Image: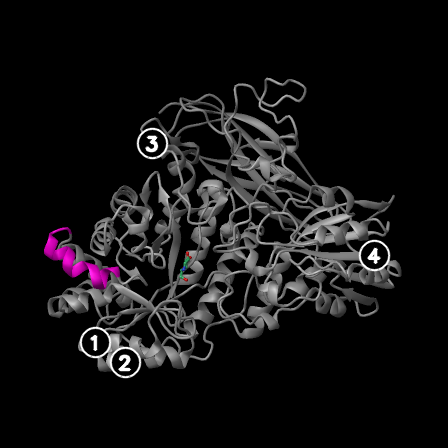
């Protein structure tokens, strides 16, 4: 045994095997194909088995289930010449069997501990299904809700994404990759995928070097620092160079500067797509370009198998490049303990400290914490509409998401079974057994048929309150699910309008993978709640919040625009020389829209009121190397116990490069009983105030920094103090 607990030394093992391998076997280790139920390429299960036997395929994706994986592993380790086990990859993005909220929703927790715990639970399930490589976490910064994949990542902010990256990598990989319940994490999509032009998927991104270093690279840096085993380049090009062949970012930044020694796995068919990008004339050039950039595994395009032998002959690829890639793949297999016992993942029914019930409880807790109450109006002098009044006689649950299980899981729901998700109706019936709950769709999610509206209105007339369950279907976000106009789809607004016109109290629950543009609904409804796609426990989580059984704590991890014309809109914009000044046309304003978003980053209401006072720092002056503690008093004004999330922002007042108005430098949470006050401490290292200087190297500039804290990025609600950075 070596110190990592593996029986083999990974490097030694790789070197020994490499010496014995034919070119075909080497390329086999660099090839990943789909098998099992989700066969999206031309290869069928029988052909896959033959290819594994012959050493032409060393890695699979989209295969799960103990028996299925064991069958394939057995072919690899018993019937192939070199007996090398397979890597089994799968998208374990927000749960495996127990589906948690989509990542954008989970980001709303602002709770690294829970982010890690949900990933751990997912890893336990995935590993027990034979999976060794998770294509997660997705770390794409996204500032454009038109992009469907905004649902898969942690939102707009690099600090949040970096913190999320660390937590997810830890959770997926556990204490040791070799553990039977650990899976290797794949940070994706490296990088700038979320910046595609016009919010389109797979589209070109034009990102300045500065923005790359300030915004798009930090989450990946954090993932690498956390020991992430794999990285997946994004489909798109950044500044004209497709990421699958991006030498400056993959080889120079990731491998050389960050010291990443893990595996780079291409995205699905992405190497062959280099031809469509127009940077490779044929599969041979495509394969050579990806290999040169350091891409180790070719997912699904067969470019390495078909292209690398010819690339060697043409002299555009070298055996040492191939060997280096094979070595990295073998080393990962060794670190995963696959050589010790290739069949043990998948052998244990459901190993680990969390049993299925505990995972489900965790999913409920994560889901209710992901819910963001956006508005909550007063319906009488002493009561807001939420939580729902006790003793409600009749509740009308209206809309296409009201009793809908299939869509609750959201996109990329791994092997989650849609029918198992608790619907809002089921959740409410369980939480409010004394209320009569009447339910109607009114309209479908996307169709034009409005014939059900009249019947729905009839149900509303006899109800004390109407809960409108509106939004998207699960397939309207995620990959290949961009929307030029992310409003309520189909005729849902017609339904909502008709219900609102009844004059009843109305709570609108919005299920979606992105912020939806709903200004009129926000204005008219008594409450609006972002319910995202909450996963398997969706209905119970919604019921927990609506009934007041749980005091909501979710906060927006993304600025919620009023209209799509405001996009991209995010809190960390740089200042203008002519800041917005309503009424003065020659300032940075729209003629036809306010510049403020519908809801700022960090926004979210609870059922208690909290105030922040007495902001101070442990020192007024500091130097590089120091650590400050920023302190603020938080008071829960009642009427119930609650949990407050506090954000810490910094602004470098005068610097050699214009700095954003606000940069997030930390966040903290504090739980307080009604009437209780306490001090929250937020640590701030001086080096967090560095920024990429003119040469893009981290730079610390003496001078004044404004430190602001608040419950959101709303500039009108921040407390601010000034501290001074000293030279040296
Ligand atoms: C394509 C997606 O872009 C990527 O995120 C995913 O991991 C692969 N397909 C494999 O399913």
Q: Residue at horizontal 48%, vertical 37%? A: 684
Q: Position of residue 337 (x, y in %)?
A: 30, 70
State how many labels appear. Answer: 4
Mark 1 element type: loop
Mark 3 → mark 4, Cα distance in angstroms: 56 Å
Q: Badge 1 is on which residue?
A: 54
10 Å neighbourhood of mark 4: few (<14), some, or many (≥20)?
Answer: many
Mark 1 → mark 4, Cα distance in angstroms: 65 Å
Taking depth in this image into account, of 213 and 670 the one nearest to the observer is 213
Comes first in the chain, label 1 or label 2: 1
Q: Position of residue 142 (x, y in %)?
A: 49, 44
Q: Badge 3 is on which residue?
A: 696
Q: Position of residue 281 (x, y in %)?
A: 23, 49
Q: Badge 4 is on which residue?
A: 465
Mark 2 → mark 4, Cα distance in angstroms: 60 Å
Of the two numbered discs 3 and 1 in the rendering, the one whose residue sits closer to the viewer: 1
Mark 1 touching mark 2, by CB under 8 A?
Answer: no
- Label for residue 75? 2
* Picture quarter with the C terminus: top left
């Amino acid at each position: 045994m070596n110190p990592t607990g593996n029986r083999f030394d990974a490097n030694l093992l790789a070197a020994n095997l490499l010496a014995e391998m034919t070119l075909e076997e080497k390329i086999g280790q660099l090839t990943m194909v789909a098998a099992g139920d989700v066969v999206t390429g031309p290869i069928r299960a029988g052909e896959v088995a033959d290819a594994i036997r012959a050493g032409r395929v060393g890695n699979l994706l989209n295969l799960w289930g103990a028996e299925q994986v064991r069958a394939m592993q057995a072919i690899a380790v018993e019937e192939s010449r070199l007996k090398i086990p397979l890597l089994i990859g799968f998208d374990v993005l927000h749960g495996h069997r127990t589906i948690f909220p989509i990542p954008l929703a989970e980001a709303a927790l602002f709770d690294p501990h829970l982010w890690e715990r949900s990933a751990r639970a997912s890893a336990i399930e995935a590993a027990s299904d034979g999976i060794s490589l998770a294509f997660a976490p997705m770390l794409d910064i996204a500032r454009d809700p038109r992009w469907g994949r905004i649902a898969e990542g942690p939102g707009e902010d690099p600090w949040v994404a970096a913190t999320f990256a660390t937590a997810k990598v830890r959770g997926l990989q556990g204490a040791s990759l070799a553990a039977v319940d650990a899976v290797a994490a794949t940070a994706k999509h490296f990088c700038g995928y979320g910046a595609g032009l016009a919010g389109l998927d797979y589209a070109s991104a034009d990102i300045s070097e500065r923005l790359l270093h300030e915004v798009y690279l930090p989450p990946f840096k954090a993932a690498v620092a956390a020991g992430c085993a794999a990285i997946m380049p994004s489909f798109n090009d950044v500044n004209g160079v497709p990421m699958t062949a991006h030498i400056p970012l993959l080889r120079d930044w990731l491998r050389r500067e960050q010291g990443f020694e893990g595996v780079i796995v291409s995205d699905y068919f992405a190497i062959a797509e280099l031809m469509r990008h127009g940077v490779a004339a044929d599969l041979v050039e495509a394969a050579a370009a990806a290999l040169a950039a350091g891409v180790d595994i070719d997912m699904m395009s067969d470019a390495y198998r078909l292209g690398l032998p010819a690339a060697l002959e043409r002299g555009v690829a070298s055996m040492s490049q191939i060997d280096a890639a094979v070595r990295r793949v073998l080393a990962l297999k060794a670190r995963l303990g696959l050589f010790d016992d290739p069949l043990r993942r998948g052998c244990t029914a459901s190993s680990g400290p969390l049993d299925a019930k505990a995972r489900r409880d965790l999913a409920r807790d994560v889901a209710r914490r992901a819910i963001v109450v956006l508005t909550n109006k007063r319906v009488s002098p002493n009561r807001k509409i939420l939580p729902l009044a006790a003793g409600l006689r009749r509740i009308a649950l209206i809309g296409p998401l009201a009793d809908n299980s299939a869509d609750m899981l959201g996109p990329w729901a791994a092997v989650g079974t849609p029918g198992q998700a608790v619907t809002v109706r089921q959740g409410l019936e369980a939480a409010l057994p004394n209320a009569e709950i009447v339910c109607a769709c009114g309209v479908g999610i996307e169709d034009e048929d409005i014939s059900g509206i009249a019947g729905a209105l009839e149900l509303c007339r006899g109800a004390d309150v109407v809960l409108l369950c509106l939004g998207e279907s699960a397939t309207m976000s995620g990959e290949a699910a961009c929307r030029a106009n992310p409003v309520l789809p189909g005729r849902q607004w017609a339904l909502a309008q008709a219900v609102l016109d009844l004059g009843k109290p109305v709570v609108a629950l919005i299920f979606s993978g992105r912020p939806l543009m709903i200004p009129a609904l926000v204005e008219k409804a008594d409450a609006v709640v972002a319910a995202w796609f909450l996963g398997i426990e969706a209905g119970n989580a919604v019921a927990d919040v609506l009934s007041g059984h749980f005091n909501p704590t979710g906060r927006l991890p993304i600025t919620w625009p009023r209209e799509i014309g405001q996009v991209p809109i995010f809190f960390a914009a740089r200042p203008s020389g002519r800041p917005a000044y309503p009424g003065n046309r020659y300032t940075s304003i729209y003629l036809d829209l306010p510049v403020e978003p519908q809801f700022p980053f960090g926004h979210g209401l609870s059922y208690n009121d909290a105030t922040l006072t007495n902001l101070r720092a442990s020192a007024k002056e500091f130097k590089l190397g120091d650590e400050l503690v920023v302190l603020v008093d938080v008071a829960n004004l009642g009427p119930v116990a609650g949990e407050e999330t506090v954000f810490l922002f910094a602004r470098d007042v005068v610097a050699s490069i214009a700095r954003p108005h606000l940069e997030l430098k930390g966040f903290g949470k504090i739980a307080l009983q009604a009437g209780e006050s306490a001090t929250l401490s937020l640590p701030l290292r001086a080096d967090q105030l560095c920024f990429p200087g003119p040469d893009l190297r981290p730079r610390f500039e003496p001078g004044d920094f404004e430190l602001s804290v608040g419950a959101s990025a709303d500039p009108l609600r921040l407390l601010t103090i000034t501290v001074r950075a000293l030279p040296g």
